[in-house]
Image (cartoon, rainbow, N blue to C red):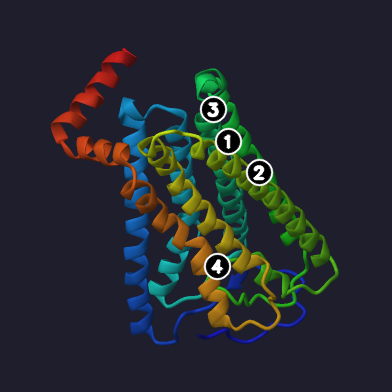
Amino acid sequence: MNTGSKMPNLTSTTEFLLLQFSDIQEVQILYFFVFLTIYLTAVTGNLLIILAVALDHHLHTPMYFFLMNLAILDLGLISVTLPKTMANSLMNSSSISYLGCVAQVFGLFLFEATDFAILTVMAYDRYVAICNPLQYERIMHRGACIRMAASAWIAGILDSMLQTGGTFAITFCSNMIDQFFCEIPQMLKLSCSDLYLVEVGLITFSCSLALGCFIFIIVSYVRIFEAVLKIPSAHGQKKAISTCLPHLTVVSLLTFTGIFAYLRPQSYTSSDLNVLSAIIYAIVPPLLNPFIYSMRNKDIKTALLRLSDCGHFSKIIAKKAFLQK
C-alpha cells in the first residue's frame, strides 16, 4: 500500500490524500469491481428491507419500524465511504477535498452513533414485548416510537457535530491519511498541536455513552431471558428467542467491530491492520445486517415474496395512491 510522502508544517490544506490499495492501475480497477459488488449488495439488501416494511401493512409494527430506521442508517453508513473509494480506485487517485473529508467524518459518526441508539431502542422494544406484553400497545404506541427514533437521530447528529468540530479544529502537519477514508484516529496522528487532546476527550465521552447503551442492552436481555425461561411451552420460548437473536447478532457485530477499531492501540498497528479494522466496522455490518434479519425472519421473507410479485406490488402502490387522494 502506498502512503506517499509527508508534507511538514501544513497550516492549512485544501485536500487530503488517502491510502491507496495499490500503485498498479489494473489492481486498482480490480478493487473497484470488488467494492462495487459489495456496495450494490449492501444497497440492494437494505433497500429491500425498507421497501418491505414501508409497503407491507403486516410489518407496520414498532419492531419493523425500528428495523427500517436501521436499514436507512446502514445504507447511509456504507455510502459515506465506498463511493469515494470506488471513484479513487477507478481514477487511480488518492485525493479527497477538505469538505469531502469533513462530510465523511460527519456522516460516519452520524450513522454509527444513531445506529447504536436505534439498537438500544430496539432492545427496549423487545423487553416490553416479552416482559410486559399486556402493556405493549400502550407503551410502544406510534407516537412513542416516533419520539424514540427522533431522539436517536438527534443524538447522532449532535455527537457527529461534536466529533467533526473537534477533529477539524486541529492544525494538521500532514495531509496524508493512513486510511482509505477520513477516519478520526488516523487524522489525530497528523496533529501539530495539543488540540487533538480535545478530540480524544470527545471520543472518550462518546465511548462512555456507547458503553451506557451497551449496559442497558445487556440488562434488558438478562431480564428478557429470565422471562423467557418462565414461559411454560418450548414453542413459546423458541418463538420469543427467535425475535431477539437477529438483534443480538447485530449488536454484537457492531460492538466488537467498533471496539476493535477505536479502543485498540493505534501507535503500533500497521496500515494493513488499520484497513482491515475499518472494513470490519464500516462495511461489514451494513453488508450483513439485511441477511441477518431476513434469513431468520419469516415475516420479512413473506413480505419480500409479496414484493417480488409485480401484480401485488402494483396493487399496493395503487391502494396507497387512492388513500392519499
Judged by depth in the image, the label closer to the viewer, 1 or 3, is 1
Picture residue at 40% right of the left edge, 43% below the top: 242
Residue 177 spot, x, y in % from top left:
62, 75
Q: Circle 4 is placed at which residue position?
A: 181
Mark 4 is surrounded, within 10 Å at the Cα level, by few (under 14), some (14 to 19) or many (20 or more) other residues, namely: many
Q: Helix, strand, or loop for circle 3?
A: helix
Taking the image as shown, residue 216 lies to the left or right of residue 315, namely right
Quick one: label 3 or label 2, which is nearer the N terminus? 3
Q: Helix, strand, or loop for circle 1?
A: helix
Picture residue at 29% right of the left edge, 40% below the top: 298
Judged by depth in the image, the label closer to the viewer, 4 or 2, is 2
Q: Marks 4 and 2, Cα distance to the nearest angstrom? A: 31 Å
Quick one: label 2 or label 1, which is nearer the N terminus? 1
Q: Marks 3 and 2, Cα distance to the nearest angstrom? A: 18 Å
Q: Circle 1 is placed at which residue position?
A: 124
Kind of residue indicated by mark 1: Tyr
Residue 207 spot, x, y in % from top left:
71, 56
Kind of residue indicated by mark 4: Phe
Residue 116 appears in the rendering: yes
Q: Marks 1 and 3, Cα distance to the nearest angstrom? A: 11 Å
Q: Residue 216 — which label?
A: 2
Kind of residue indicated by mark 3: Cys
Quick one: label 4 or label 3, which is nearer the N terminus? 3
Quick one: label 4 or label 1, which is nearer the N terminus? 1
